Amino acid sequence: MKFLILTQYYPPEIGASQTRLAAFAKQLELRRHCVEVVTAVPNYPTGKIFPEYRKRWLLSEKCDGITVHRSWIYASSGTGFKRMLNYGSFAGTSLLAMGRVRKPDWIFVESPPPSLALSALLLGSLWRVPVIVNVADLWPDSARAMGLIRDGLFLRFLEKLERFVYGHARLVNAVTEGIRSRLIQDKGVAPAKVTFLPNGVDPELYRPLPPDESLKQQLQLSGSKVVLYAGTHGYAHDLEHVLDCARILSGQNIHFLFVGDGSEKLQLIKRAHKLQLKNVTFSDPVAPNQMPRYFSIAECGLVPQRKLPLFDGNRPAKMFSVMASAKPIVFSGEGEGARLVSDARAGLQVSPEDPIAMAAAIREIMANPSLGRELGENGCEFVRSNFAWPALVRDWLEQLPVSNSLSTEFPRNTVGNKRP
């Protein structure tokens, strides 16, 4: 089959959705399907177009063997009107990039932003090709929950847009059980129309490794016990409470290493300086193929999130790379992600936004190396058995209808047989 993946975010940008979609595309290619990607010129998370892509309005290139077509975007970070321009500009210019694509059998479009699904539906209608909307985040629900959008006319418009997109898509794909339940129960999507492809991990890339002492020396962390946070530095990730936790643990040879970027990073650096935290290091984002080195020097991985009902159905993608690296997780949050850590016996779960409890969990792991090894080994075995990308994509392909026509006959809503 021929797949067109339409997404605003894709490597060389670094982030959860970028990593997930690149792995998805790679697995489709390995299973001898044809894949093309339409995406924006790289600009995330800084809101600045990468230097080598500036003044490039439309281009095509190979990215890890996948044909990628890129179009201009109004680059911006943060919220408000500029973010809407960011979303809207690519929804428009992506239509030009899709003019370079061979007619596919399926269009797989990433949401958010929901505006991009309109471009997919338009091309799908013209080409007579079915559209799969991949719901990685229930937007605008998440934007409202985090205070990014207020109740009013604009929010009602976005909710109508959401209903229109789900109603006209051939299939709607969920990445967590919580999203799948809400699509069916709250959003009115027919159960037979919902497929399931959860976040996964590449077990060949993320695996147990001996500590990379040269990296530890480079980061001036030799002799320190490292707590690693790797991912986006955004509001949803509650990193200010991680800094409070670091203050509690100061003077105990425990060092917090933040790897990544995001809208909150500058404020976090300022706050760490104000608190005079000597046990905190902020590192620039690194390519996914370099991340295993960072996991190798960590005693545990940190996965925090805010206390919001919206996150009850959330599985942070970063947790899978921690587990695949055989490192114990300190999960500061609730809901589906916390239950998965518990089911896997892969770490310690504490209440969100509670730096004292977080500090206690980190102390427990640091004081008991055998516990850390046991939790790490449990997590590694769990993700390799249940969340390796090859098996996830194979199971997802089996959920697609035999015929990809635009008829209203939908497949049975089967889910991978190793779902926890």
Image: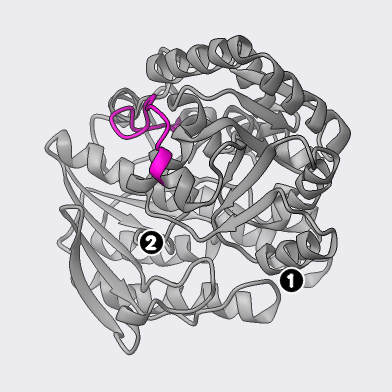
Estimate how packed mark 2 is, as few (under 14), some (14 to 19) or many (20 or more) residues with alpha carbons within 10 Å: many
Total marks placed: 2
Which stretch is magenta? Answer: 195-214
Q: Give the crowd class for mark 1: few <14, some 14-19, many >=20 residues within 10 Å.
A: few
Q: Amino acid at mark 2?
A: Ala
Residue 238 located left or right of residue 115: right
Give me the residue at 67% from left, 14% from top.
368
Q: Nearer the viewer, residue 273 or 208?
A: 273
| Residue 301 screen position, x and y as percent | 59, 33
Q: What residue is shown with label 1?
A: 154
Q: Residue 273, located in which quarter of the rendered image?
A: bottom right
Label 2: element kind: helix
Q: Going 81% across and 36% down the picture, which residue do you hit? A: 352
Q: Residue 159 appears at what percent x and percent y?
A: 68, 58
Question: Magenta stretch: residue 206 in it?
Answer: yes
Report the residue marked by disc 2. 120
Q: Nearer the viewer, residue 171 or 260?
A: 260
Residue name at image x 30 percent, y 64 percent: 38
Image: 205 above or below 59:
above
Q: Is residue 40 among the parts visible in the rendering?
A: yes
In the rendering, at what x and y percent does residue 46 appear? 54, 72
- Camera-side residue: 191 or 199? 199
Q: Amino acid at mark 1?
A: Phe
- Which x, y percent locates residue 131? 36, 50
